[in-house]
Image (spheres, helix red, strand yellow):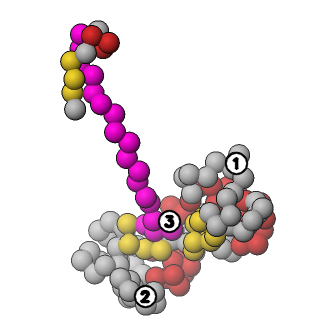
Amino acid sequence: GRVFDEACGGGVCVAMDCVTVQVVRCRYCAGEGDSLSKVMREYALDMNWLRLWALNGNDNGPGSMVLTNPDLIEEGTGAQHLFVGVTYAAKPGETLVAIAARMRTTVKSILSLNFDVDGMHPLVDGQELCVIPCSNFALE
């Protein structure tokens, strides 16, 4: 709350609260009229929308919807929350370079999909990363 305080020069001090936001990895919230090719252009240089189709064209368990039209993501169908990659749990001592090599992607791609990973600090055992496998060929 607001408190009048001499320490604030007679002004108003605002108490600070900390908030933790948990973001679900490898998900994209599509807007009206989005297509798989448009979404893929945002996440990968090769623009292979078939990769998104493979991740979202099947029943992926409770709460998932089967995406039936790759050219149009319809509102109200539950299909707006798309998988854009797979979630990978880092193994003890594993590096971004090793994960990129194993998944045939790039460190740059992994960093762009994981805002909380800076590449300067070691990965923690079990740390989850969003990865788009087999996406390095467009850069070769």
Q: Is residue 24 magenta?
A: yes
Residue 132 lies in what quarter of the image?
A: bottom right
Whether the residues at callouts 1 and 3 have beta carbons within 8 Å, the answer is: no
Tag 3: amino acid? Arg
Q: Disc 1 to disc 3, how far (Cα)?
A: 19 Å
Mark 1 — residue? Answer: 121
**Residue under circle 2?**
61
Q: Is residue 45 left or right of residue 6?
A: right
- Between discs 2 and 3, the one toward the N terminus: 3
As drawn, 123 above or below 126? above
Q: Does 57 appear above or below 29?
A: below
The quarter in which the C terminus is drawn is bottom right
Question: Over which residues does the magenta segment extend?
Answer: 10-28
Q: Would you name the residue on which mark 3 appears?
A: 25
Q: Assign the magenta stretch its main secondary structure.
A: loop
Q: CA distance from mark 1 to mark 2?
A: 34 Å
Q: Position of residue 92 (x, y in %)?
A: 75, 65
The residue at the point 56 percent across, 59 percent down is 113
